[in-house]
Image (cartoon, rainbow, N blue to C red):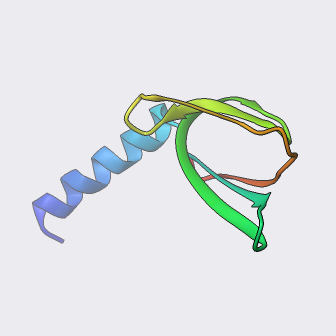
């Protein structure tokens, strides 16, 4: 293993200890069928079947509201 790979692994381990990553997939009933949206978040503040609120991996706020309820899947990566 080269020293570059070792340093990359160390950064990855430190990132996993101090940072969270969530992958949120939502499906919304549309005119043609279900529409799929995927969000990669570092912070998840609120998640209901009509409201998603959090911060993306770059620290920008994300808020998604819908009048129609949607299905969702939450995966915590680390």
* Residue at the outermost front position: 31
Tell me where residue 21 sits by quadrant.
Answer: top right
Residue 37 picture quarter: bottom right
Q: How many marks?
A: 0
Is residue 76 toward the left or the right of residue 17 in the image? right
Residue sitting at the far left: 3
- In this view of the protein, which residue sits in the foreground, 19 or 50? 50
- Quick one: 9 or 31, which is closer to the camera? 31
Q: Is residue 62 above or below residue 68?
A: above
Residue at 54% in and 41% down: 41
Left or right: 10 with respect to 67? left
What percent of the width, then of the height, locates residue 57? Answer: 43, 39
Residue at x 86% of width, y 45% of height = 68
Q: Quadrant of residue 34?
A: bottom right
> What residue appears at the point 40 percent right and 47 percent down from the top-left corner?
13
Where's residue 48, x and y in %? 84, 36
Q: Quadrant of the N terminus?
A: bottom left
| Image spot of residue 17 (x, y percent) | 48, 37
In the visual, does 11 lie left or right of 67? left
Residue drawn at x 87%, y 46% is 69
Q: Position of residue 36 (x, y in %)?
A: 67, 64
């Amino acid at each position: 293993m080269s020293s570059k790979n070792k340093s990359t692994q160390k950064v990855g381990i430190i990132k996993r200890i101090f940072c969270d990553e969530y992958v949120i997939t939502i499906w919304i009933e549309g005119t043609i069928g279900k529409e799929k949206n995927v969000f990669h978040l570092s912070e998840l503040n609120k998640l209901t079947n009509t409201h998603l609120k959090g911060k993306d991996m770059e620290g920008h706020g994300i808020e998604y509201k819908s009048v129609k309820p949607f299905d969702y899947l939450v995966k915590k990566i680390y």
